[in-house]
Amino acid sequence: MKACALILGIALALSSGCAGGDDSLDGSVSEFYPLAFDSVRARLYDSELAIEYVREDGETVMRVTVRRDERDPQGPATFDLSAVGDLTGSAGGVELPAFVDGRLVLDSYRPRDRARVEGSFEARVASGQARLSVRGTFSTRLELVEDL
């Protein structure tokens, strides 16, 4: 019985495509675009909040951004990425197809260094006439980054 539970746990970890237990990326875009990543980071720049799914070599597989206007985003909150954000990425020399629409949900967020950032996103991208889905979850600490 313990062996079955161990095998099931390993299979679930491998199928998520990432190292973190609360961090995931999946969706129909995976048929054309590699979603494997090693870690997630949340960065607050002068101009935007970015949730970045990155590989060990520093390549950003998926980058979900919310522009900062006169005030910081606060959590919990839901953002229409079509109105205030974007979705970009590059993996193995392949660019993520063009962003169409989506939303970012912040379950936990404060604009303070090392504050816990937790949430999820779902979006659609376009490849020719096809609309492909991508969704992810994240749980990490916020890093404040000063723009130069």
Image (spheres, grey):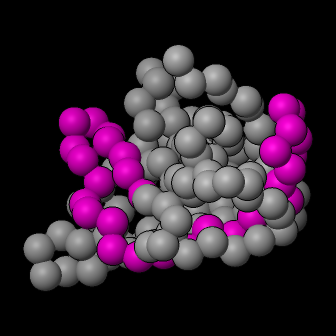
For the N terminus, give its image quadrant: bottom right
Magenta stretch, main secondary structure class = strand
Q: Please report the bounds of the magenta region as a residue range.
A: 87-116
Name the quadrant containing residue 38: top right
On the picture, is 134 further left or further right than 75?
Answer: left
Q: Is residue 137 above or below residue 38?
A: below
Total numbered labels? 0
Q: Position of residue 100 (x, y in %)?
A: 33, 74
Tell me the residue at 49%/32% (across/down): 55
Going 62% across and 55% down the picture, which residue do you hit? Answer: 69
Nearest to the observer: residue 72 or residue 128: 72
Q: Position of residue 114 (x, y in %)?
A: 86, 33
Q: Would you say residue 70 is visible in this rendering?
A: yes
Q: Is residue 77 left or right of residue 13?
A: right
Estimate the x, y position of residue 58 in percent, counting from the top left: 47, 24
- Say whether residue 107 is magenta: yes
Residue 14 in view in this figure: no
- In x, y percent, where is residue 67? 55, 54
Q: Is residue 128 above or below residue 143?
A: below
Q: For this rendering, which residue is in front, 120 or 20? A: 120
Judge left or right: residue 22 versus residue 90: right
At horizontal 22% and vertical 44% (from top left) the residue drawn is: 94
Q: Is residue 76 magenta?
A: no
Query: What residue is at 58 percent from the left and 63 percent from the top?
Result: 136
Of the pair 30 and 147, the residue shown nearer to us: 147
